[in-house]
Image (spheres, helix red, strand yellow):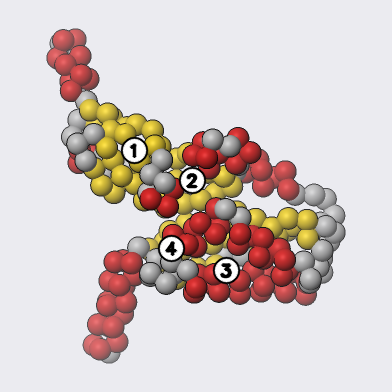
């Protein structure tokens, strides 16, 4: 292939501006190139909460979005994951203290299945029963939050720190805590996927 034809192919690429979902105020996430609009679907783009809010103090929070719709020169995305950076989590660890985490899968009121991973750091070393009680509190509060909220409401509560604050206020009565965070949140299934799984389960039960 000649240099001219290669150059022509590069010129034919179109750049699409990637937009965050409405829950993040349709902020611009960046640009992605493609020869055809179909190539843009399902691409993921990662940014930080700090970049979205123009607040460097929030750069420890990483957000991942997936492109689900494409216009003439714009690509629209959906939120799929929130995660704290490893460096930040490592900075919270202290010798002679306890780290208590949990992995909780919940269903929001609008049928999004989401895995939420809260983590609590104690001021000193807690015993097994205290760690168990803290973990139980985290699980209960995350489940209650999902039962009362839409997907957008749950993610907003997590990203803005309200859920971790609620866990801290409750769990500190069990044992003194230094910090509570939600270290990771991930979408496991969208409503249509949840509905398809439930339908398949019903079919299996009817055939049994």
Position of 85 compared to 93: left or right? left
Task: Point out the tag, 2 or 1, that comes first from the N-terminus.
Answer: 1
Query: 153 or 201: nearer the eye?
Result: 153
> For the residues marked 4 and 2, what is the alpha-carbon distance in whole angstroms?
15 Å
Disc 4 versus disc 3: nearer the observer: 4
**Lateral position of residue 82 relative to residue 98, left or right:** left
Check disc 1 and report the residue beneath it.
18
Residue 46 or 110: which is nearer the viewer?
110
- How many badges with numbers are in the image? 4
Q: What residue sits right under mark 4 in the picture? A: 151
Helix, strand or loop at mark 1: strand
Task: Name the spot of residue 177 as percent of width and height, x first.
Answer: 78, 60
Q: Residue at x 30, y 72 (%)?
A: 195
Which of the two discs, 2 and 3, labels the residue nearer the N terminus? 2
Tell whether label 3 touches label 2 (CB within 8 Å).
no
Q: Quadrant of the N terminus?
A: top left
In the displayed structure image, the side of residue 100 where residue 12 appears, left or right: left
Q: Which residue lies at the image location 27% right of the left edge and 71% below the top edge?
A: 196
Which residue occupies the extreme front position in the image? 25
At mark 2, the secondary structure is: strand
- Whichever of labels 4 and 3 marks the residue nearer the N terminus, that label is 3
Q: Earlier in the sequence, mark 1 or mark 4?
A: 1
Q: Give the labeled residue for mark 2.
A: 63
């Amino acid at each position: 292939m000649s240099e001219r034809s290669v150059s022509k192919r590069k010129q034919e690429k179109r750049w699409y501006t990637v937009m965050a979902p409405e829950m993040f105020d349709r902020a611009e996430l960046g640009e992605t190139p493609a020869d055809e609009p179909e190539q843009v679907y399902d691409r993921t783009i990662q940014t930080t909460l700090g970049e979205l809010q123009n607040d460097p103090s929030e750069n420890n929070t990483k957000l991942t979005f997936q492109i689900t719709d494409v216009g003439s020169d714009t690509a629209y995305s959906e939120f799929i994951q929130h995660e704290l950076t490893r460096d930040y989590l490592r900075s919270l660890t202290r010798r002679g203290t306890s780290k208590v985490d949990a992995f909780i899968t919940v269903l929001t009121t609008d049928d999004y299945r989401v895995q939420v991973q809260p983590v609590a750091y104690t001021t000193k070393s807690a015993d097994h029963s205290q760690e168990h009680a803290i973990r139980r509190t985290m699980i209960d509060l995350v489940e209650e939050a999902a039962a009362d909220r839409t997907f957008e409401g749950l993610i907003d509560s997590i990203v803005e720190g309200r859920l971790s604050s609620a866990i801290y206020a409750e769990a500190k009565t069990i044992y003194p805590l230094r910090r509570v965070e939600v270290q990771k949140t991930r979408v496991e299934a969208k409503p249509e996927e949840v509905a398809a799984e439930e339908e398949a389960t019903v079919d299996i039960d009817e055939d049994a």
